[in-house]
Amino acid sequence: MVKKNLSPYFSVITCSKYGEGLLRTLKSIQSSDFQDYEVIIVYGKAKSEVFAAKKEFLKDERFQFHIDHSSGIYEAMNLGAKFSAGRFLTFLNAGEIGRAHV
């Protein structure tokens, strides 16, 4: 189990309404050489891809999942920012790929 740093350098906020592309995005973050981060996943209507991601990434304490029933992406991004503890915030939405080397 990977332990969460209480004050990570980066907070990566990933928003997704239905979860399309979520696994690919989270795997790209996890495969990065840079490891001082946390990932806050904010999702709306849970689908099978969200449940698969939760099953795979809940063992890693750097990954947090939060459900949001708000009306839009900006509310979800703000919710992710509220849960973040990192020195810097970055947004990488479901379906996007993070760089392997920072």
Image: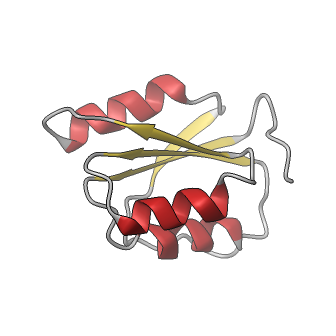
* In this rendering, position of residue 29 left or right of residue 62: left
Residue 3 spot, x, y in % from top left: 85, 44
Residue 8 spot, x, y in % from top left: 74, 37
User: Can residue 83 be seen in the rendering of this structure?
Assistant: yes
Q: Using the image, determine if residue 95 lies above or below residue 42.
A: below
Q: Which residue is drawn at 13% across and 36% down?
A: 71
Q: Residue at x 25, y 32 (%)?
A: 75
Q: Residue at x 77, y 61 (%)?
A: 34
Residue 65 spot, x, y in % from top left: 51, 43
User: Can residue 102 be seen in the rendering of this structure?
Assistant: no
Q: Using the image, determine if residue 101 lies above or below residue 73.
A: below
Indicate the quadrant where residue 56 lies: bottom right
* In this rendering, position of residue 5 left or right of residue 102: right
Indicate the quadrant where residue 86 lies: top right
Residue 69 spot, x, y in % from top left: 23, 34
* In this rendering, position of residue 86 left or right of residue 12: right
Q: Nearer the viewer, residue 45 or 12?
A: 45
